[in-house]
Amino acid sequence: MERILGAAPAFWSADLEGELSSIKRAGFDATFLDWNREDMKKDADLARRLGLFVQSIHSPFSGDCRVAHLWKEGKEGVAVRDLLLACLEDCARCEIPVMVIHPFIGFKDHTPTDVGIENYAKIVKRANELGVTLGFENVEGEEYLAALMQAFWNEPSLGFCLDTGHELCYNGGKDMLALYGEKLCHTHFNDNLGVYDPTLTWENDLHLVPLDGIVDFKNVMQRIEKTPYQGPIIFELSVSNKPGRHDHDRYREMGFDGFYTFAYTRARQAVSLR
């Protein structure tokens, strides 16, 4: 089947309209947006006015919303839970069907807790009420994703967001769709170089344009076609270098139009592989 293709803003620019306009001009028809706590509806309306389908809000996961706190007792976890609930309300208010959510952040801890399940249970319950799907993303701390999927598998709002780059570096190449493909509701397509440093850190998560790394997109597409998912294939790319590296220099030098045109060409190539 012919897939709708989408791209999220990659430049982290203050010129959101300029960037979304370039995404649309390049040929993409969908996007997702990061949560704008001040005026999410303004951003969503802008994207739609430009002709883009807004599939999701990516909820925050670091800073004052560090999701690792959800797995611990204390007021910090409650504060994070309340921020995620506020993001969820914005999804419903802006008629955005999916909220992408990170189960965890960090590389040292590997033990899900009852308090974490209880915190996420409140988010799942409210998502059920609002009719919003929660796209739990495969990130570091795979045990936390597994605990959430097991706990909430039968909940109407439970969904899975596949990040192809994370699958290769954070999940060691494990077939995450074999585990959660039945719940696939969103994608973050991007490329990377696997674990190029013996110590797995966020620096391995490059978010390169497809075919600039070693992700096997033919295999990815073959696996996606075995799932029930028929929605957009959305690309989450970056133009920002990781410390000490220059993988993204040429992307940023292209500017908005050059980069998104290049990304769209590669996106079509990636999804056509079977």
Image (cartoon, grey):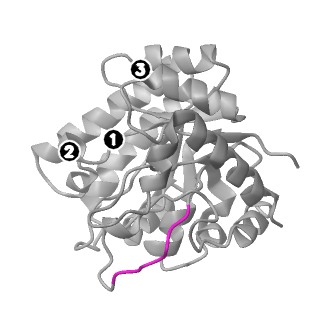
Q: Amino acid at mark 2?
A: Gly
Q: Residue at x 36, y 26 (%)?
A: 14
- Residue neighbourhood size for the residue with mark 3, other residues' Cα within 10 Å, grouped as few (<14), some (14–19), many (≥20): some
Q: Is residue 202 above or below residue 100?
A: below
Q: Nearer the viewer, residue 108 or 148?
A: 108
Q: Check residue 195 for magenta coloring.
A: yes
Callout 2 touching callout 1 (CB < 8 Å): yes
Q: Is residue 178 left or right of residue 246?
A: right
**Screen quadrant of the C terminus:** bottom right
Q: Residue at x 61, y 64 (%)?
A: 180
Q: Is residue 7 left or right of residue 10?
A: right
Distance CA(mark 2)–CA(mark 3): 19 Å
Residue on which the image places disc 2: 63
Residue on which the image places disc 1: 60
Distance CA(mark 3)–CA(mark 1): 13 Å
**Which element type, helix, strand or loop, lies under badge 3?**
helix
Badge number at residue 40: 3
Q: Earlier in the sequence, mark 2 or mark 3?
A: 3
Q: Amino acid at mark 1?
A: Pro
The magenta stretch spans which residues?
A: 191-197
Q: Nearer the viewer, residue 98 or 114?
A: 98
- Residue neighbourhood size for the residue with mark 1, other residues' Cα within 10 Å, grouped as few (<14), some (14–19), many (≥20): many
